[in-house]
Image (cartoon, rainbow, N blue to C red):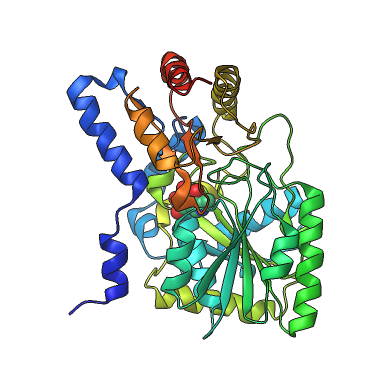
Amino acid sequence: MVSEKMYAWGASPSVIRDLFEYGNKRKAEIGAENVYDFSIGNPSVEPPTKVREVIEELLRDTDGVTLHGYTSGPGDMGVRKSVCDYLNKTYGANLTPNLIYMTCGAAASLTISLRALCEEGDEFLTFAPFFPEYRVFTESVGGRFGAVACDEEFQPDIGELKHKINEHTKGVILNSPNNPSGAVVREERIAELCDLLRECSAKYGHPIVLIADEPYRELVYDDVKVPYLMNYYDDTIICYSYSKSLSLPGERIGYIAVSDKMTSAERVYLAVCGAGRSLGYVCAPSLMQRVIARCQGLTSDVSIYRENRDILTEALRSDGFSVVQPDGAFYLFMKSPEPSAGAFSEKAKEFELLLVPSDSFGVPGYVRISYCVSTDMIRRSLPAFKQLAESYNL
Ligand code: PLP
């Protein structure tokens, strides 16, 4: 009657969503101000004012037929040109608009890219901890999904990747800045990764594609640089989204950029167009395409996230918790003081703290704290974290 695979994904509980729902119930019971909800990654900082100004101008100055009509499948040519110009200017890339494909955000960018690349028997690897939807996206296009460990600082373990990579490996998904760890992969590690991918591509006789999932690219602190992967590895596809950089997650806008140096770049791009078509995306939202074309280079106020990170990291460390200070995104991955992250998350609920257990991110023994919340809530939550630490005698 239905696809068992789809049914299983629809029916399987999402730990994050369940915690979020629990939080809403609890807020109704004891008052929103008494619940410290760190469960979800919805940006808490307003989009730049220019975004609204551009929307208003577009509504005022553009006729509705043009503004709300279909664009071509890969996106409006003027929009693709402005994305391309920005990338070339900012990262020294050498892209043309015919390598840019506008999408409904990073989730669509990833699903389309995976579908474009995946043939029977192909495998895609990523590094744990990882965004849980990678498994769904990969398996939905018929690929096999696998994960490779990171070290204690959440940097990819290239030795383990070397061990796991095999003739079926078609691509490696790299997410930096990372959800859920907040880690930014350092340049030396990227160089090592790219050397290994070149070596294995030659060994197995086909390119192993680096799929860069970059919705948090601009959300970095203290002058940390996020290397632009096309400059390090030719067979790179960038999956980008404006969901986090411009605080527009509900508007569904992003793009895929296929490196001009990629093996058979034109064929890969056409496969991307075919994958988008086969998934029924038609085109990315027309109004939003035009908005982002005029907001290139803008970012929501990252200093708010940085302040949140600093307050939390300092307080959690002084409480006795073990945390690696994240360099980017708006997540903090904290070690659970007991082996079971689920049990720790349950314990935290007793203090009205909603922390996501790490198992669905592919590693045991941590919780994810989304600090894209108000700074006021963070300050008010600190006594609860202290009590939580005391309950473990930290
Ligand atoms: N990739 C990662 C690592 C994410 O954290 C998210 C969203 O949280 C996505 C992809 C999907 O983002 P989008 O809203 O642009 O589809």
- Tell me if residue 33 comes above or below residue 173 in the rendering: above
Using the image as rendered, state which of residue 215 and residue 25 is in the foreground: 25
Quadrant containing the N terminus is bottom left
Please state the horizontal and vertical placement of residue 90, each as a whole percent of the image.
73, 48
The answer to which image quadrant residue 65 occupies is bottom left
Residue at x 27% of width, y 62% of height: 10
- Tell me if residue 311 comes above or below residue 17 in the rendering: above
Using the image as rendered, state which of residue 345 and residue 306 is in the foreground: 345
Q: Let me know if residue 289 appears in the view.
A: no
Q: Let me know if residue 80 appears in the view.
A: yes
Residue at x 82% of width, y 50% of height: 188
Seen in the image, is 107 located left or right of residue 65? Answer: right
Using the image as rendered, state which of residue 139 and residue 250 is in the foreground: 139
The answer to which image quadrant residue 124 occupies is bottom right
Using the image as rendered, state which of residue 345 and residue 130 is in the foreground: 345
Please state the horizontal and vertical placement of residue 386, each as a whole percent of the image.
47, 16
Please state the horizontal and vertical placement of residue 87, each as a whole percent of the image.
69, 53
Please state the horizontal and vertical placement of residue 361, each as a whole percent of the image.
49, 51
Seen in the image, is 85 located left or right of residue 293? Answer: right
Count of marks, rendered view: 0
Residue at x 55% of width, y 57% of height: 79
